[in-house]
Amino acid sequence: MTWFQSFFLGAIQGLTEFIPISSSAHLFLVPWFLGWQDSGLTFDVALHLGTLFAVLFYYRKEWIDLTKEFFKHGFKSKMPTYLALATIPAALVGALIEKTAETVFRNPLLVAVMLGLMGVALWVVDKHSQKSKDFKHITLKDALIVGFAQCLALIPGTSRSGVTMLFGLVCGFNRAAAAKFSFMLSMPITLGACVFKLRHLSVSDVNSVFVIGVLSSMLFGFLAIGGLIRFLQKQSFKVFAVYRVVVALIVVTFIFLRSST
């Protein structure tokens, strides 16, 4: 892998991890379109470390406050407990179907179908949901619903941020609150995934390509978080829903053209 590929894929990861258009789909489809080789486990860890650092830094004040709250009140503290409980379902399911998710699910047609379906669902729910609750009014029921919904993100094309924002809207969150909870929920699940995969890496794997991937993913992830929060304070999810459907149609067309030649 070249430095340019590392930077480019890092930018894609950073942007699409937090914007609801599916990072897994784009990281699969871009090399597929361009004929690049699979980046492998090592680089996957680099990209997720970058987005982990991005969300930790962007919400650094919130994480410090939540840590203090947890050490002071333990599991009686509301938000740390909700985040922990919401992480458990996807963590368990991910551990059980890790190999399936990385092999069987990595299919262009499946990715296209999930991009399209989730795009339509996001459009419909965004249009008809109440959007009356802000971040501080999240309940245990809300956290569990969003947490179980996060399991769907194991299918490439679904989008972890997309499905958690979608079900945040279902629970009545306003758009910015749904996005914030989605972003904060990404920290524990991403941290767990990185720790789980780091055991397969050695010191020699941390080279210039690895570092560039981390930095690029972190930079663009940080920009994506702030940009999306500001965008959703005034705009809807419509543009992302349309984008998903358009990309799905392009992928299906591309599959058809390749199969007919």
Image: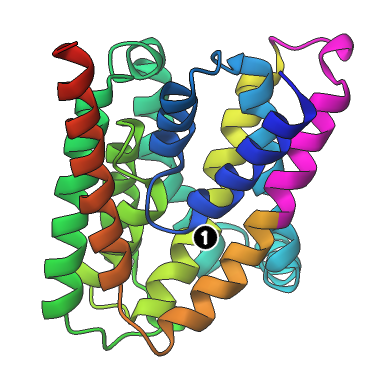
Near-viewer residue (42 or 85): 42
Please say whether residue 201 is one of the residues in the magenta stretch.
yes
- Where does the magenta region start and end? 200-219
Quadrant location of the N terminus in the rendered image: top right
Mark 1 residue crowding within 10 angstroms, few (<14) / some (14–19) / many (20+): many
Residue 27, relative to residue 167: is it above or below? above
| Residue designated by label 1 | 183
Q: Amino acid at mark 1?
A: Phe
Q: Residue at x 83, y 33 (%)?
A: 211
Side of 136 relative to 127 (left or right): right
In terms of image quadrants, where is residue 114? Answer: top left
Residue 133, relative to residue 170: is it above or below? below
Near-viewer residue (30 or 68): 30
Q: Residue at x 41, y 54 (%)?
A: 161
Please provide percent x and percent y for residue 142.
Answer: 29, 65
Q: Residue at x 51, y 76 (%)?
A: 229
Give the structural element (helix, strand or loop) at label 1. helix
Near-viewer residue (3 or 157): 3
Please provide percent x and percent y for residue 4.
Answer: 74, 33
Side of 258 relative to 5 (left or right): left
Quadrant location of the C terminus in the rendered image: top left
Residue 111, relative to residue 141: is it above or below? above
In this view of the protein, can residue 53 be seen by the observer?
no
In this view of the protein, can residue 106 be seen by the observer?
yes
Please provide percent x and percent y for residue 159.
Answer: 36, 46
Please say whether residue 38 is one of the residues in the magenta stretch.
no
